[in-house]
Amino acid sequence: MELWISIALVSLISTVALAQDDVFDPTSRDYTYKCESMAKKAREGEQCPLFEMCCNTFAGDRMNGDKCQLPDPKNGCEYNEQTGETIMLCKAYNCTEMVTTTTTTTTPRPIRIETKGSSSKTDLSANFLPPFSYLAANCSL
């Protein structure tokens, strides 16, 4: 019985430890996809040097926009000739905290103006510009 409890406990602890990798950390950045996309456009044999140059630009430069201070020591690109597989990793830590935002769309309420001596109301909502979301989707600068 104790063996089953021990196995269940070890299994639970390892599950929790593995699940912690998926937790959002606003002070870390993963540039792997960005640099991998760039490197895949290079000719055969030039992919790893291009990936590493991209990774050093994003994760290794402490003065970039994110001001990441610690590049992951496992960053790099490794090509396995036997399997033909390329392993790429580019992460940085201790970066400027990422601010999460939400966007909401609101429609303006109609403005009604009463004129002196008149009981009629004027609706000015027809003279308003469309909501910003409409402008952003349908207009170009």
Image (spheres, grey):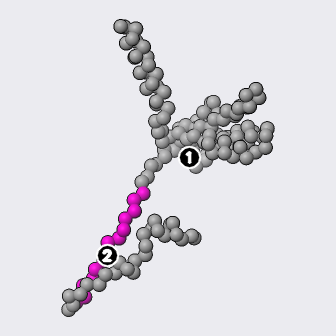
Q: Quadrant of the N terminus?
A: top left
34 vs 21: above or below:
below
Answer left or right for 93 relative to 103. Answer: right
Rendered location of residue 4, percent (x, y): 39, 11
Rendered location of residue 9, percent (x, y): 40, 17
Crowding at dot 2, Cα within 10 Å, few <14 / some 14-19 / many 20+, comes out as: few
In the image, residue 110 lies in the stretch drawn in magenta: yes
Answer left or right for 26 relative to 44. Answer: left
74 vs 63: above or below:
above
Rendered location of residue 96, percent (x, y): 51, 44
Q: Amino acid at mark 1?
A: Asp
- Magenta segment: 103-116
In the image, residue 94 lies in the stretch drawn in magenta: no
Q: Amino acid at mark 2?
A: Pro
Answer left or right for 18 relative to 49. Answer: left
Residue shown at 20% from the left, 92% from the top: 117
Using the rendered image of the protein, determine whether residue 57 is visible from the camera's viewpoint. Answer: no
Residue shown at 42% from the left, 54% from the top: 102
134 vs 40: above or below:
below
- Within the image, what quadrant is residue 10 found in? top left
85 vs 27: above or below:
above
Q: Quadrant of the C terminus?
A: bottom right
Q: Which disc, if any, is residue 66? A: 1
The residue indicated by pointer 2 is 110
